[in-house]
Image: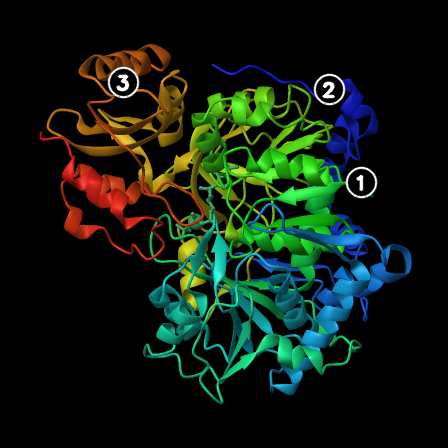
């Protein structure tokens, strides 16, 4: 089903890591992790050098994860101060507004000055090392300034995506007991205003949120908001009086940097806590290798800062590497679905990193919007967030990249802090739909239900058998939940919750969430393969499959299918699609039920929420569980109303 896309010799010739280097360094990294990461850790500036590198035990009775434990550093100084001498005038952030006529370039020197002012401001408001600060901002430069300012004083930020409701915000503030909230009057996305300050006001009326002493409000749209004295203060009024110098606070490598809640695809979001030293080593090193970063690159990650991708690969990784990173306030289809590619041309973007959900949405609109822009500056494309269907991969490669740009399909999680399985673009041949091989120092394995490690070409549950520096350290406020969730299922290993297949070349294919595996007459089927077969049909834009009760087979396959723009559902097409899957994969995988879906339920980060689809298929729409991260609840109601009568 998949075609091999070998590394192009031209790309390999100039790549940071070629095939020989990957094989050599990977072997070293797993043979001698201590020596390997001792060397790699030196890419950062440490105010007190580490002597210890790795102290890890996944044994639940003697559990610890510590990296560079006795080292001290400051993350903001690593992202800003140390670049000033050589890169002071280099653009750190290219900001592209929601309105195509609005953009700004911020140099490393300017960003440093702003972050120093904000660090002084937070300090003057009584925020100290270890205090928690909630950041609920649109994609504006102040979001970066706020995050870096927290890091500069050793405060722990928790960024909450600006699309979340007052209840979701309140839950996160209450869980992490924030002292201060940084927000804006309103956000602007796709020409529409988002009532951020009003949401904060509502959130702070919810129980558990009275830890908040101050709300700082950035003026973005100038819309009217109620300021409640003495709690609410204008950001710019307070920033004006601050000094642009600030001595960064040295923190221990293991001191917390941020708390971030997972997407909530499988249940209630978890408060993932990341540390400072190991995290930054890992985020910066993966960013440099995976994106084959060069000094003159213009790098664009389309993720919101509210997701982990926005932390590691929009902000911290790129800035630690002295890169130019693009921050986009808007959405892919505003003013029209050519926007991404127009931004690429406007700012001469060379490296582009987005999610399968965006690629599938753009694919639905056809090639014309892409072809309107030149995209000649692009040299590498990336994907993250879900398995990318081979069909979408090929489209991304052929249409967006003009068959010229390697694609890095990066598998990782909020919990992992950085990319764990990915092609390195100059070293690893790509197979559409496969995240390919592990990054340096990463030891994946596939286990069966009993936890036995399976060798060779096989399929099962994906675990990681040893630690890497970017690994999360705890679930905030509930260390036992951390151990129970990730280390109890398979003793001595980190359990990812994802299923995977490994082929004869040792390539990993994420088959979907383990919770979503469908068991048809004793055969285990991952969701990804069946969905990709459906998406491979020329009329299908997107698909999601789940298991549903079936009298004879135990479980049947229930598929939800979204057609491409201009296609109409019919009984004939339904039969054609069922036959298509049967032909692509085999009779075992042919859907028993196929429901047309004008939209699929997704998290606000764009991931399909199959657990909700499963409940609909089971006819239990009253048991949907935590739906706080659902992007559009209306989609669910439509699917419930149109559920197939069986
Ligand atoms: P929750 O843990 O709350 O259910 P979530 O798992 O969606 O939410 P994230 O940490 O944002 O939260 O997502 C990580 C998951 O996304 C991975 O476990 C995997 O299922 C999926 N994923 C990410 N990147 C890829 C990829 N390149 N290929 C396949 N799956 C991916
Ligand atoms: Mg998860």
- Circle 2: element type: loop
Q: Answer left or right for 108 relative to 151.
A: right
Which residue matches tag 3?
588
**Marks 2 and 1, the one that precedes in the sequence:** 2
Q: Residue at x 27, y 34 (%)?
A: 546
Closest to the observer: 505 or 608?
608
Residue 202, which numbered label? none
Give the vertical position of 541 relative to 622 (above or below). Answer: above
- Circle 3: element type: helix
Closest to the observer: 272 or 103?
103
Q: What whole-number distance in Å separates the C-alpha atoms at marks 2 and 1?
A: 18 Å
Q: Answer left or right for 525 relative to 427.
A: left
- Circle 1: element type: loop
**Marks 2 and 3, the one that precedes in the sequence:** 2
Q: Residue at x 74, y 63 (%)?
A: 111
Which residue matches tag 2?
8
Which residue matches tag 1?
294
Asked if the residue under mark 1 is in contact with the one under mark 2, i.e. CB atoms within 8 Å, the reply is no
Residue 58, x across and y down, in percent: 53, 56
Residue 95, x across and y down, in percent: 66, 52
Residue 88 seen in the current view = yes
Q: What whole-number distance in Å separates the C-alpha atoms at marks 2 and 3?
A: 38 Å
**Marks 1 and 3, the one that precedes in the sequence:** 1
Give the vertical position of 449 relative to 627 (above or below). Answer: above
Q: Residue at x 57, y 78 (%)?
A: 234
Give the vertical position of 506 relative to 78 (above or below). Answer: above
Badge 1: residue crowd in 10 Å (few <14, some 14–19, many ≥20): some
Q: Quadrant of residue 596?
A: top left
């Amino acid at each position: 089903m998949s075609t091999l896309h070998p590394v192009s010799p031209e790309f390999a010739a100039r790549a940071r890591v070629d095939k020989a280097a990957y094989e050599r360094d990977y072997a070293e990294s797993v043979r001698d992790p201590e020596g390997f990461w001792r060397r790699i850790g030196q890419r950062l500036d440490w105010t007190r050098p580490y002597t210890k590198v790795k102290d890890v035990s996944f044994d639940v009775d003697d559990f610890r994860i510590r990296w560079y434990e006795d080292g001290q550093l400051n993350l903001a100084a690593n992202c800003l101060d140390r670049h000033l001498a050589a890169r002071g005038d280099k653009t750190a952030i290219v900001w592209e507004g929601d309105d195509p006529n609005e953009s700004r370039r911020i140099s490393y020197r300017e960003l440093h000055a702003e972050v120093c002012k904000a660090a002084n401001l937070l300090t003057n408001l009584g925020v100290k090392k270890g205090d928690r600060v909630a950041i609920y901002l649109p994609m504006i430069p102040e979001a970066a300034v706020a995050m870096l300012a927290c890091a500069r004083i050793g405060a722990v930020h928790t960024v909450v995506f600006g699309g979340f409701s007052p209840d979701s915000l309140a839950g996160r503030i209450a869980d992490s007991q924030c002292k201060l909230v940084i927000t804006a009057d309103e956000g602007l996305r796709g020409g529409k205003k988002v009532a951020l300050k009003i949401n904060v006001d509502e959130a702070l009326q919810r129980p558990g949120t009275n830890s908040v002493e101050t709300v700082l409000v950035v003026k973005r749209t100038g819309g009217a908001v109620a300021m409640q004295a003495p709690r609410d203060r204008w950001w710019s009024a307070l920033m004006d009086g601050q000094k642009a110098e600030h001595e960064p606070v040295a923190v221990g490598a293991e001191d917390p940097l941020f708390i971030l809640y997972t997407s909530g695809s499988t249940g209630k979001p978890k408060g993932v806590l990341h540390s400072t030293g190991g995290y930054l080593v890992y985020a910066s090193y993966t960013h440099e290798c995976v994106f084959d970063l060069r000094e003159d690159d213009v790098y664009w990650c389309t993720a919101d800062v509210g997701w982990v991708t926005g932390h590691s690969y929009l902000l911290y990784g790129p800035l630690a590497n002295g890169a130019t990173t693009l921050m986009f306030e808007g959405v892919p289809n505003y003013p029209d679905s050519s926007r991404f590619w127009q931004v690429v041309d406007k700012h001469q973007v060379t490296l582009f990193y987005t999610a399968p959900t965006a690629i599938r949405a753009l694919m639905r609109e056809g090639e014309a919007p892409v072809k309107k822009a030149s995209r000649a500056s692009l040299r590498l494309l990336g994907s993250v967030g879900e398995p990318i269907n081979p069909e979408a991969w090929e489209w991304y490669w052929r249409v967006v990249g003009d068959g010229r740009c390697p694609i890095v399909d990066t598998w990782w999680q909020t919990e992992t802090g950085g990319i764990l399985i990915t092609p390195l673009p100059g070293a690893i041949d790509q197979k559409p739909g496969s995240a390919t091989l592990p990054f340096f120092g990463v030891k994946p394995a596939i286990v069966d239900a009993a936890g036995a490690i399976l060798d060779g070409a096989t399929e099962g549950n994906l675990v990681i058998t040893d630690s890497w520096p970017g690994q999360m350290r705890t679930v905030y406020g509930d260390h036992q939940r951390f151990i129970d969730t990730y280390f109890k299922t398979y003793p001595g290993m980190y359990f990812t919750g994802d299923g995977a297949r490994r082929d004869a070349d040792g390539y990993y294919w994420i088959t979907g969430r383990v919770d979503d595996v469908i068991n048809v007459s004793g055969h285990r089927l991952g969701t990804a393969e069946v969905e990709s077969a459906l998406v491979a049909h020329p009329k299908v834009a997107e698909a999601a499959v789940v298991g549903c009760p079936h009298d004879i087979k135990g479980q049947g396959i229930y598929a939800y299918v979204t057609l491409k723009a201009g296609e109409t559902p019919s009984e004939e097409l339904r039969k054609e699609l069922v036959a298509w899957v049967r032909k692509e994969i085999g009779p075992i995988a042919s859907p028993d039920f196929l429901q047309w879906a004008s939209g699929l339920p997704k998290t606000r980060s764009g991931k399909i929420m199959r657990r909700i689809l499963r409940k609909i298929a089971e006819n239990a729409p009253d048991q949907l569980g935590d739906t706080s991260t659902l992007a559009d609840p209306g989609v669910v109601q439509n699917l419930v109303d149109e559920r197939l009568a069986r």
